[in-house]
DNA sequence: ATGTGCATGTAACTGGTTACATGATTCG
DNA sequence: CGAATCATGTAACCAGTTACATGCACAT
């Protein structure tokens, strides 16, 4: 369970891009934030890793140590870095918050403009989603059971929070881009 | 894509519980709210349906019509109804909003108390999640790139909206339960 | 004639899971 | 002595996807 569709592939590539890691390292790291984005099992992690290596997106160095088992340390290649960049810059299709958050996590190679473009796209998608929810809520009116009403209201409350946050975040960032004195936003 | 882990099984069972439907009917229905909860493909829908029938949770009646192809109308059995009830009443483990919303959608057989128990459980889970997020955000402090900060802030904003909504919804419902005059909440 | 809607289903593939196998070392 | 940590991997399974197969009716 790694939060749908982000494929584990690019998540791992993103982690290795920051610093070389073994499969075990990655598992450890993700385990500690499993509550946030979920941690894949070894059964998917190792195969995915060797596939990335096979595709030339990363290189493997076997590090032998006395006493402990040898570890395979994976480092990103130039091809890997550009593949990651390409993936992370391309507009994410609308999905769960978790998927989007994972994308942001890996997106440290993103320029401020690209980052803002991601947020803008998300804002656009969530706004449309929110409008749809509002329509349906009105259309449902008295009909439908209380569970359905609650479901819609709940979804709507969350969507509203998302658009509000995205709006203010974008505003903050464009202001920070306005005065060119401080490089770091916020 | 039916929003993880709810297994399609109980979603379909829930739909058929409301009124008998063919596989095609279900697909149509879900297609129209695919933006909300996602629609499964025929390739998973039909097999799941026949498995439910095989397990005795629903019965199949082949309805022949001149001009149009015959349809297999599925109706829920007693066993099916109790299986659904059992599933829907059991505490949902913490997952995505979508999964929870789907549960609520199907939960029209739920008593107000059971419904409130579901919300209470969710509130408990999200509150813990929110606390964890707040901790990590503080711990991250100056470290971490802007993407990571944004990811955490975004998640936190949504979590806050969830707890706020859940709190007020529960309050409303317990008030409505207080004056026993009107049976329908809200 | 061509495509769209109705209606069912199967087969191949994908991307994950759990459980298993191996084997050394350190901690209680 | 047994359990946990380190470290890698494979095999069986599962739930979903896409693409394909079939076939009739109706509208363009």
Image (cartoon, coloured by chain):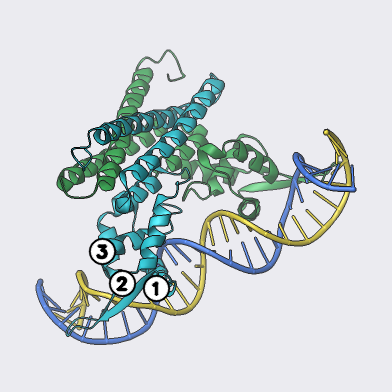
Chain colours: A green, B cyan, C yellow, D blue
Residue pictured at 36% horizontal, 62% vertical: B81
- Mark 2 lies on residue: B74
**Residue A122, image quadrant:** top left
Give percent across and percent down for residue A57. Answer: 60, 48
- Mark 3 lies on residue: B28
Q: Is disc 2 on the same chain as disc 1?
A: yes
Q: Is residue B119 visible?
A: yes
Q: Which chain letter matches label 2? A: B
Is B186 located above or below residue C18 in the figure? above
Name the element at disc 1.
helix
Viewer-proximal residue, B185 or B20? B185
Q: Which chain letter matches label 3? A: B
Could you give the CA–CA distance between mark 2 and mark 3, rounded to whole angstroms?
15 Å
Residue pictured at 31% horizontal, 40% vertical: A155
Residue pictured at 27% horizontal, 36% vertical: B177
Q: Look at the image and tell me in which quarter the N terminus of chain B lies.
A: bottom left
Give percent across and percent down for residue C4. Answer: 20, 69
Q: Are marks 2 and 3 in contact (CB under 8 Å)?
A: no
- Mark 1 lies on residue: B53
Q: Are marks 1 and 2 in contact (CB under 8 Å)?
A: yes
């Amino acid at each position: 369970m790694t939060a749908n569709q982000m494929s584990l592939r690019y998540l791992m590539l993103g982690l290795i891009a920051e610093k070389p890691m073994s499969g075990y390292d990655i598992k450890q790291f993700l385990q500690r934030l499993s509550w946030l984005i979920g941690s894949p099992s070894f059964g998917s992690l190792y195969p995915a890793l060797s596939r990335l290596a096979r595709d030339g997106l990363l290189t493997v160095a076997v590090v032998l140590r006395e006493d402990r088992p040898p570890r395979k340390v994976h480092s990103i290649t130039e091809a890997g870095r550009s593949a990651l960049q390409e993936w992370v810059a391309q507009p994410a299709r609308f999905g769960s918050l978790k998927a989007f958050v994972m994308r942001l996590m890996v997106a440290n190679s993103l320029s401020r403009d690209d980052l803002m473009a991601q947020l803008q796209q998300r804002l656009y998608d969530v706004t449309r989603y929110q409008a749809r929810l509002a329509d349906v809520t009105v259309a449902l009116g008295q009909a439908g059971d209380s569970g359905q009403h609650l479901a819609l209201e709940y979804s709507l409350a969350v969507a509203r929070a998302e658009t509000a946050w995205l709006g203010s975040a974008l505003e903050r960032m464009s202001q920070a881009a306005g005065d060119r004195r401080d490089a770091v936003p916020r």
